[in-house]
Image (cartoon, rainbow, N blue to C red):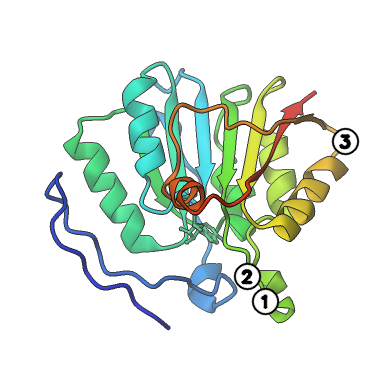
Amino acid sequence: MRSLQAGRLRSNQMPRVRIHQHVNPLAPYYRQPVESIEIEKIFADPSLPLHLDIGSARGRFLLKMAGIEPGWNFLGVEIREPLVDEANRLAEDHGLTNLHYKFCNAMLVLDKLLEKVPEGVLQMVTIQFPDPWFKKKHAKRRMVNRELVDAVTKKLADGGKIFVQTDIEFLAGEMFALFRDNKKLAEIETTENPFPIQTEREKAVEDKELSVFRSNFLKI
Ligand SMILES: C[S@@+](CC[C@H](N)C(=O)[O-])C[C@H]1O[C@@H](n2cnc3c(N)ncnc32)[C@H](O)[C@@H]1O
């Protein structure tokens, strides 16, 4: 498996951690059970609406969102554990009490992870540029599967939204079809990103002037 080089110190003085570029979500290590999140233990004000970002990577999107939206709590979930540890350290360094990251395999355990989140709290879900796992033999490793769609839809508040974007056209088709199949969701087609912050991947895609496929789904 390829490793990224440990980077130099960045302007915020956080060394970039050494990580694998991809991990196999079906490997035994990533099939471990997960403890349910207890929002009163991770956020200063658990009564705030919750935004869940699935596949949060280094977490910079949520770090910026949490800074400019103090009226929301933000939870990032990510399968590459070192990135989660680094992102939580950064959130603490910034004194953000409305931001937390959790190591988990979102394709398997989201239902359990969100079990204790009170009804009506989860109001926004983002899934941005998930790994495409291009080869047919790796299709089962793709993060957005029916279980994930059902788990987030079950916990999403009425009127809550799911925003999905990717630069990979076939993956957009596959993901949007799964969300369209869920009868509790209504699609609101969009070409725009509704957030004031771009993810790292979105910036890279935009720099290359590639197309981005986006959609919103509203819980009805
Ligand atoms: C291409 S990156 C995009 C990261 C970020 N959302 C962005 O737009 O910059 C996809 C991220 O999803 C994570 N990921 C892939 N499969 C996952 C899974 N089953 N559970 C949680 N995270 C996963 C990867 O480790 C990676 O950090």
Q: Which quadrant of the structure image shows residue 81?
A: bottom left
Mark toward the start of the polypeptide (2 vs 3): 2
Amino acid type indicated by mark 3: Lys
Amino acid type indicated by mark 1: His
Which residue carries the number 2 mark? 133
Which one is nearer the viewer's eye here, 151 or 33?
151
Which residue carries the number 3 mark? 183
Mark 3 vs mark 1, CA separation in Å: 28 Å
Which one is nearer the viewer's eye here, 165 or 218?
165
Q: SS class of the residue under badge 1?
A: helix
Measured as percent of width and height from the top left, residue 169 is found at 72, 56
* 95 lies left or right of 169: left
Which one is nearer the viewer's eye here, 46 or 156?
156
For the residues bearing labels 1 and 2, Cβ distance under 8 angstroms: yes
Q: Residue at x 63, y 70 (%)?
A: 133
Which residue carries the number 1 mark? 138
Q: Which quadrant of the structure image shows residue 39?
A: top left
Q: Which quadrant: the N terminus?
A: bottom left
| Label 2 CA crowd tier, 10 Å (few <14, some 14–19, many 20+) | some
Mark toward the start of the polypeptide (3 vs 1): 1
Mark 2 vs mark 3, CA separation in Å: 27 Å
Between circles 3 and 1, the one closer to the viewer is: 1
Between circles 2 and 3, the one closer to the viewer is: 2
Using the image, determine if residue 77 lies above or below residue 116. below
